Image (tube, rainbow, N blue to C red):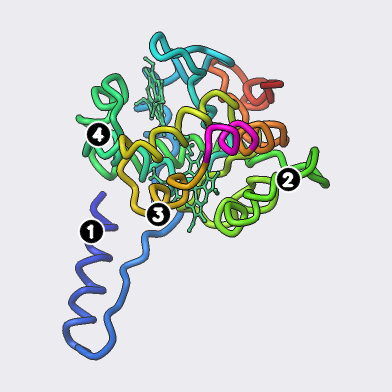
């Protein structure tokens, strides 16, 4: 249950004992229990389990979570809980979740299937995407568990997210500085490019075999 905290405690204790170089406590990528996560994710499916479901206002599609990186799901949920991401509904969802709950939820979404990466990217990458792929990966398929994949995410959600970093509504120092110089046209082009790639998918909420749930949607 508290393995992570113990791990953090031990690496801190170790760092203290050695007292030379600081040791970074690294969270294991799959620390969660997917079965418990599935139970906790039941209410999430009312929005995230319906392909193309729209947020009432402002109107953009609810992000796809299928194929998303594990640590990023936890980071995003912590952001909604701490309100470094301003979204009332997601704050209400995340506020009662412990870090362990979040790990379990992430493990459940990861257990729904890996990102469906195509052999080649679609379209020509806008010039500005060169910086982005250093972290978000070629065509937006992330290579690190704490960086989100962008490939196949809904275009309107990507636009919304970039505008929130740019406007300082989402408080993330890295993405804040990445989004600051982007024009409205850059944001459109980048979102179009990453949304056009095959990748993330909606996790379907249905009783039955897992394979029946994983269907990529076009947008
Ligand atoms: C009422 C609809 C609704 C419900 C229920 C809901 N979500 Fe969300 N979720 C959203 C919307 C809308 C966003 C985008 C919020 C924003 O603009 O930042 C979102 C964003 C997210 C993100 C960030 C994804 C990304 O790519 O940035 C994660 C992770 C997430 N939700 C997980 C969950 C989990 C886990 C639950 C259940 C405990 C849940 N959501 C329940 C609507 C919902
Ligand atoms: C140094 C690494 C790095 C670079 C470079 C970078 N990002 Fe990010 N990006 C991140 C991290 C970390 C997050 C998650 C931040 C958070 O917790 O909200 C993120 C989040 C995002 C999101 C939100 C995804 C979601 O599901 O909510 C979008 C969209 C995005 N980045 C687009 C871009 C674009 C476009 C560029 C290039 C102009 C870029 N990023 C460059 C690390 C990076």
Question: Given contact means CB atoms under 8 Å apart, are the residues at marks 1 and 2 in contact?
Answer: no
Is the CB of mark 3 within 8 Å of ligand 2? yes
Q: What stretch is highlighted in magenta?
A: 183-189
Residue 89 inside the magenta-drawn segment: no
Q: Residue 174 carries which label?
A: 3
Q: Distance between the residues labelled 3 and 2?
A: 21 Å
Regarding mark 4 in the picture, which secondary structure is present there? Answer: loop
Q: Name the residue: 58% across, 40% down.
A: 150
- Main SS, magenta region, reads helix
Q: Name the residue: 28% across, 57% down.
A: 3
Question: Given contact means CB atoms under 8 Å apart, are the residues at marks 4 and 1 in contact?
Answer: no
Q: Which one is in front, 94 or 83?
A: 83
Nearer to us of marks 4 and 3 is 3
Coordinates of residue 82 in the picture (x, y in percent): 21, 39
> Is tag 2's residue or tag 4's residue first in the polypeptide sequence?
4
Image quarter hosting the C terminus = top right
Q: Which one is in front, 162 or 200?
A: 162
Residue 185 inside the magenta-drawn segment: yes
Q: Name the residue under label 1.
A: 5
Nearer to us of marks 1 and 3 is 3
Q: Which one is in front, 33 or 93?
A: 93
Q: Residue 116 carries which label?
A: none
Q: Distance between the residues labelled 1 and 3?
A: 26 Å
Question: Given contact means CB atoms under 8 Å apart, are the residues at marks 2 and 4 in contact?
Answer: no
| Residue 112 shown left or right of residue 88 in the figure | right
> Is tag 1's residue or tag 2's residue first in the polypeptide sequence?
1
Q: Distance between the residues labelled 2 and 4?
A: 38 Å
Q: Residue 125 carries which label?
A: 2
Q: Name the residue under label 4.
A: 97
Regarding mark 3 in the picture, which secondary structure is present there? Answer: helix
Q: In this view, does 4 lie above or below 126?
A: below
């Amino acid at each position: 249950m508290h393995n992570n905290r113990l791990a953090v405690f031990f690496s801190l204790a170790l760092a203290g004992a050695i007292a030379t170089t600081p040791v970074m406590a690294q969270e294991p990528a799959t620390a969660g229990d997917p079965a418990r996560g599935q139970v906790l994710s039941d209410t999430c499916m009312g929005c995230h389990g319906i392909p193309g479901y729209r947020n009432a206002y402002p109107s953009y599609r609810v992000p796809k979570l299928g194929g998303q990186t594990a640590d990023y799901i936890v980071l995003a949920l912590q952001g909604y809980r701490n309100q470094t991401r301003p979204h009332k509904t997601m704050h209400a969802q995340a506020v009662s979740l412990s870090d362990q709950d979040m790990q379990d939820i992430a493990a459940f979404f990861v257990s729904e299937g890996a990102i469906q990466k195509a052999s080649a990217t679609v379209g020509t990458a806008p010039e500005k995407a060169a910086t982005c792929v250093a972290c978000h990966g070629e065509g937006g398929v992330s290579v690190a568990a704490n960086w989100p994949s962008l490939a196949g995410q809904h275009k309107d959600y990507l636009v919304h997210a970039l505008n929130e970093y740019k406007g300082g509504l989402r408080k993330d120092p890295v993405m804040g500085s990445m989004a600051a110089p982007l024009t409205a046209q850059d944001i459109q082009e980048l979102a179009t490019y990453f949304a056009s790639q095959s990748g993330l998918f909606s996790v379907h909420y249905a009783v039955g075999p897992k394979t029946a749930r994983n269907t990529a949607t076009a947008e």
